[in-house]
Amino acid sequence: MEGREEDVRVGANKFAERQPIGTAAQTQDGKDYREPPPAPLFEPSELSSWSFYRAGIAEFVATFLFLYITVLTVMGVARSPTKCASVGIQGIAWAFGGMIFALVYCTAGISGGHINPAVTFGLFLARKLSLTRAVFYMAMQCLGAICGAAVVKAFGKSQYEMHDGGANMVSAGYSKGDGLGAEIVGTFVLVYTVFSATDAKRSARDSHVPILAPLPIGFAVFLVHLATIPITGTGINPARSLGAAIIYNKDLAWDDQWIFWVGPFIGAALAALYHQVVIRAIPFKSS
């Protein structure tokens, strides 16, 4: 009995924790995380690294698949005689959010899983990647989006053009200012979620809780689409808007194209500023 009581008294303290978690994971300097150093503006050495080009290819393939599934879903809803005979707006939103969830999960370890020039731009402003890599990512994202939309059009050119090719445009009853505002706020929600879900400090402090970053990112895309599909069809991704516009190639798609670049880039910049300056107060931290 005495030996058994000793085991109960010692309990979980008998063996030391091999890997401290949560607030117990703090280092000697009082921090429970390590802030990654800012990426250099130019990194010429990246151009000779296979991982650089592998990441670009991953962004191309991911954006290609993203446009293929999402635009095909939009076409299916548009050609349906009634909303009850299709997945409707909710289904379109799930297609966009679900694909982002799946693709970010697949590519996060290779390229970071941006799949969106606005996300890349926001992370660049926060010095998370170099200008060299940011420009390369954006180019590959746009190229992938064009190819994805082209494959959808190849399935049925007449149906594709009849239903506007899934191109983004400001809906009747809304002004261009309304569309611009919707794109700014929608992209802010997305990019702010990206920053929060991938934050080094949050990952360290919440290390006792499994966090799957692609899930909140995909869910943010889903919610933004529910809110803004009736206004602009929801861009919040310049590559998605450009790819559909180039393949559809009608004046209707090009008239509002600037909204789907200016809006997302402003929203991404505001999200980066808010997270880095207000939430994390990085400019005010001593080195």
Image (cartoon, rainbow, N blue to C red):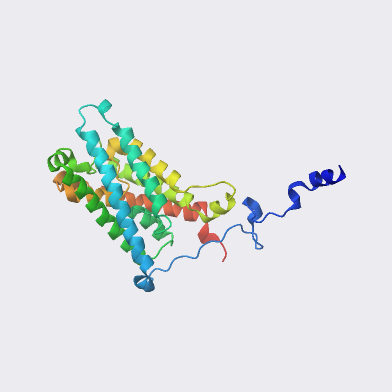
Residue depicted at 16% across the width and 46% down the height: 154
19 lies left or right of 231: right
**Which of these two is toward me, 152 or 171?**
152
Residue 171, by quadrant, is top left
Q: Quadrant of the C terminus?
A: bottom right
Can I make out residue 175 in this image?
A: no
Q: Position of residue 260 (x, y in %)?
A: 27, 48
Q: Is residue 199 left or right of residue 183?
A: right
Q: How many marks?
A: 0
Measured from the top left, where is residue 33 in percent x and y? Answer: 58, 58
- Return the residue nearer the eye: 105 or 245: 105
Query: Residue 104's x, y, as percent?
Result: 40, 50
Residue furthest right as drawn? 2
Q: Residue furthest left?
A: 158
The image quadrant where one finds the N terminus is: top right
Q: Where's residue 161, x and y in %?
A: 14, 41
> Front-most of 230 and 249?
249
Q: Residue drawn 45% across and 52% down?
A: 195
Q: Is the residue 204 above or below the residue 53 in the image?
A: above
Q: Is residue 88 visible?
A: yes
Residue 252 picture quarter: top left
Residue occupying image coordinates x 18% and y 51%: 246
Q: In this picture, is 85 found above or below 145?
A: above
